[in-house]
Structures are given as C-alpha cells and as structure tokens.
Image (cartoon, rainbow, N blue to C red):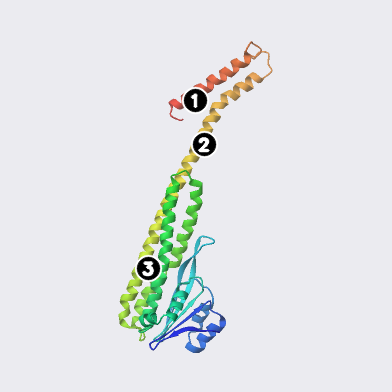
Amino acid sequence: MQINQIKTKKMTWLHISKPTPADIEYLRAEYQFHPLDLEDCIGRIQRPQISEYPHYLFFILTFPFYDRKNKVIESSEIDFFIGPKYLITISDGLTQVVDNFFHDMKKNDYSQDQYMQDHPVFLLYEILHRLQNYTMPMLDHVNHDIEEMEHNIFTGKEKIVAKEILNIKRNIVNLRKIMQAHKNIIKKLMASNTKVFMPNNTQIYFSNILDRTKDIWDILETQKENISAFQEANESLMSYKLNEIIRVLTIISVVLMPANLLAVIFGMKSEATPIVGARFDFYIIISLMLVIMTGLLSYFKKKDWL
C-alpha cells in the first residue's frame, strides 16, 4: 500500500483515490476515526453528510462529473476528514480535480507554502473552491444546450427537440440532486468554528463557498424553469401540428365521403338506377362527384376551415 501525502511543518495532507480496505485499515490504525465514518468511505453512498467529533470533522460531498461517452452528468463522491493538523481527502476517482491538485501541490513548493502553511481549513477551502470552479463549465454547457434547443424548437425539429429536452432535464435533475445538500453542509461547517481545532477566522472563507453554492443553486433553478417552459412550448407546437394533420385528414374524409356514396349508389346493378347505361354515363357521374367535392371545399374555405 502506498500512502500519498504531503507534509509541511504546519500540517499533513493525505489523499486517497479509489480507497481499498488496506487504505481504510491504515486510517483506522493511524487516526482512530469512527468505524461508521470509515465504512462510509469504502462504499459509494452518494449521500452528503457531516459528523462532528471532539478531535475531527468528517463530511461527504458529491460533485458532478461529465460522462462524455453517454453525454450525461453523474455524481462523484469525495470524503473529507479534517483535524487540527491534517486534512484527509478520499475520492472515488471519477472527478480528477482533487487528484490533479494534489499531484501539482506535491511537485510545487510554492503551492505548499501558499496553501499548507496555516490551518488545514484553508487548504480545504481551496479544494472546495476548485471543485466549485469545476462545476461551472457544466452549468454553462447546460445553458448552451438549452439555447440550442430553443432555436431548434422553432425550426420544425420538434421531434428531435423532444429527445434533447429529456436529456437536458435529466442532467439538470442530476445536478440538483448532487448540489442540493451543499448549502446545509457548508452551514454546519461554518457553525463548527466553535470547535477547539477550528480557527475563528474561517467564517469568511466558508461564507464565500456558501455564496457560490447559492449561486450554483440559483442557476439550476433558472435552468429548471427554462427547460420546463421550453418543453411546454415544444409540446404545444407538436400538439398544434398534430391537430392540423387531423383537421386536414378529417376534411379529406368528409370531401371523399359523398364521392364514395355516389360510387356505391351507381355501382348497384339495378334497372332503376339513373344515368347508368346512358351515353357518357361515366363522365356524368365523375362530374357530379367533382361538383359535390368542389362545393364542399368551397364551403370549408368560406368557413375558414382550410
């Protein structure tokens, strides 16, 4: 087992990507974390939560990542242990933000001096800040999809748009599920500055994270309202076109009905049937059908049904 960690005089940052039972056993032996917290780390619970203890805080947050193959936004879990002189992050490996930041930090002494020469909470702030920055392009991408879909609605692509709307709504719903618990978790972190190991000057940092969380949620609310409105507009257009098709087909049926009736009448083999047997009887019957059909079409047009 290889433990990835960065040590400075002030603190230690230990990062685990895709934890194994051996990693969890190491944390159990070295830090004496609660067994339930360690159990949460080994499985994908996909449920943000926070637990407070006298000597450390444990919390779980989920962040979005974009599955390019399936074109869907899914959830990635990141677990945090923070104590007086350490920060431990555990990632499921889906979101590479923390992994990349850790590897960059390990190679860069300047970054270590910048983020790891004070309390671990300041490093935690930088990680959360980067994860939020990673979320913003996904929101922009959803906005772009909504704008493109809006354009397609009014260009006769209602059927294609209907599928696009469902994909966009799925991504918005997934984003909302991922981000909805962040505000409460951050508020509890802000309230935890009364703990002995949490410095009092962290309020402004968590306030910044909280404000960005609210901004992200507001964007998601707007996107939800927009996609719902466009879905209604698209369904209305599809319904209107369907009604137009039904109306045209109904008119055609009504116009052809007298012609069918005449064809049946004159098709009966009866001695008393008029016109049949006379000179030019076929053309007379056809002309009669055309006159009736033209009359019906003129009537429908006068009534503005055409």
The outermost residue toward the top is 279
Q: Which residue is mark 2?
A: 246
Rendering coords of residue 248 (x, y %): 51, 33
Disc 1 residue crowd, few under 14, some 14–19, many 20+, Cα 10 Å: some
Task: Report x, y in % for residue 181.
Answer: 42, 69
| Real-space Cα separation, disc 2 to disc 3, in angstroms | 49 Å
- What residue is shown at x 38% (from left), y 61% (from top)? 219
Residue type at tag 2:
Ile
Per the image, label 1 sits on a secondary structure element best described as helix
Name the residue rendered at 34%, 81% in the picture: 193
Residue 20, can we see it?
A: yes
Q: Which residue is mark 1?
A: 297
The circle drawn on residue 190 is none
Q: Which residue is mark 3?
A: 213
Q: Secondary structure at mark 3?
A: helix
Q: Residue at x 46, y 47 (%)?
A: 235
Foreground mark, 3 or 1, reads 3
Instruction: Name the front one of labels 2 and 3.
Output: 3
Q: Is residue 222 left or right of residue 25?
A: left
